């Protein structure tokens, strides 16, 4: 099982955003932050560590660091439009709660 699945919308947007870019890797993970404990990290990068898990989608790669992988098992990366904003969003059944701002999360 992959640690994270991608929706068709996320795959299309990832291809669009990485075309012609030197950074064809999208790092997805979690980092300690905020009042609830963690926050999601989604960023374009050209750096891959030998300890990273790399999911190759042919035109781009998803890169997940070793510490984040356990939090992302069963999660899904989607591309969503919310009002005027569009961005990648992680839908994660492992989330337990989030803080009032919606940026900081805890896990089961």
Image (cartoon, rainbow, N blue to C red):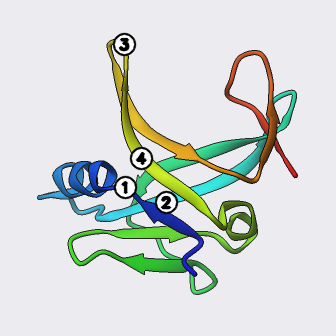
Q: Residue furthest bottom?
A: 50
- The crowd level at tag 1 (other Cα within 10 Å; few <14, some 14-19, many 20+) is few
The quadrant in which the N terminus is found is: bottom right
- The crowd level at tag 3 (other Cα within 10 Å; few <14, some 14-19, many 20+) is few
Report the residue marked by disc 2: 27
Q: Earlier in the sequence, mark 1 or mark 3?
A: 1
Q: Earlier in the sequence, mark 4 or mark 2?
A: 2
Which residue does the image show at 36% across and 13% down from the upper left?
83
**Helix, strand or loop at mark 1:** loop
Which residue does the image show at 14% across and 58% down from the upper left?
19
On screen, residue 7 versus residue 48, left or right, reads left
Q: Earlier in the sequence, mark 3 or mark 4?
A: 4
Report the residue marked by disc 4: 78
Q: Earlier in the sequence, mark 1 or mark 2?
A: 1
Labels 2 & 3 near each other (Cβ < 8 A): no
Q: Earlier in the sequence, mark 4 or mark 1?
A: 1
- Estimate the spatial distance between the alpha carbons at disc 4 and disc 1, rounded to whole Å: 5 Å
Q: Height in image: 31 above or below 54?
A: above
Report the residue marked by disc 1: 7
Quarter assignment of residue 51 = bottom right
Labels 4 & 1 near each other (Cβ < 8 A): yes
Comparing labels 4 and 2, the label whose residue is closer to the camera? 4
Comparing labels 2 and 3, the label whose residue is closer to the camera? 3
Labels 4 & 2 near each other (Cβ < 8 A): no
**Helix, strand or loop at mark 3:** loop
**Helix, strand or loop at mark 2:** strand
- Estimate the spatial distance between the alpha carbons at disc 1 and disc 3, rounded to whole Å: 20 Å
Report the residue marked by disc 3: 83
- Estimate the spatial distance between the alpha carbons at disc 1 and disc 2, rounded to whole Å: 16 Å
- The crowd level at tag 4 (other Cα within 10 Å; few <14, some 14-19, many 20+) is some
Q: Position of residue 74 (x, y in %)?
A: 63, 64
């Amino acid at each position: 099982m992959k640690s994270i699945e991608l929706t068709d919308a996320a795959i299309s947007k990832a291809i669009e955003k990485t075309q012609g870019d030197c950074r064809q890797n999208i790092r997805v993970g979690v980092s300690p932050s905020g009042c609830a404990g963690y926050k999601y990290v989604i960023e374009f990068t050209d750096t891959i560590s030998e300890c990273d898990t790399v999911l190759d989608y042919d035109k781009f790669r998803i890169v997940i660091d070793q510490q984040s992988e356990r939090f992302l098992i069963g999660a899904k990366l989607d591309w969503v439009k919310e009002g005027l904003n569009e961005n990648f969003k992680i839908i994660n059944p492992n989330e337990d709660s989030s803080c009032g701002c919606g940026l900081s999360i805890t896990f089961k």
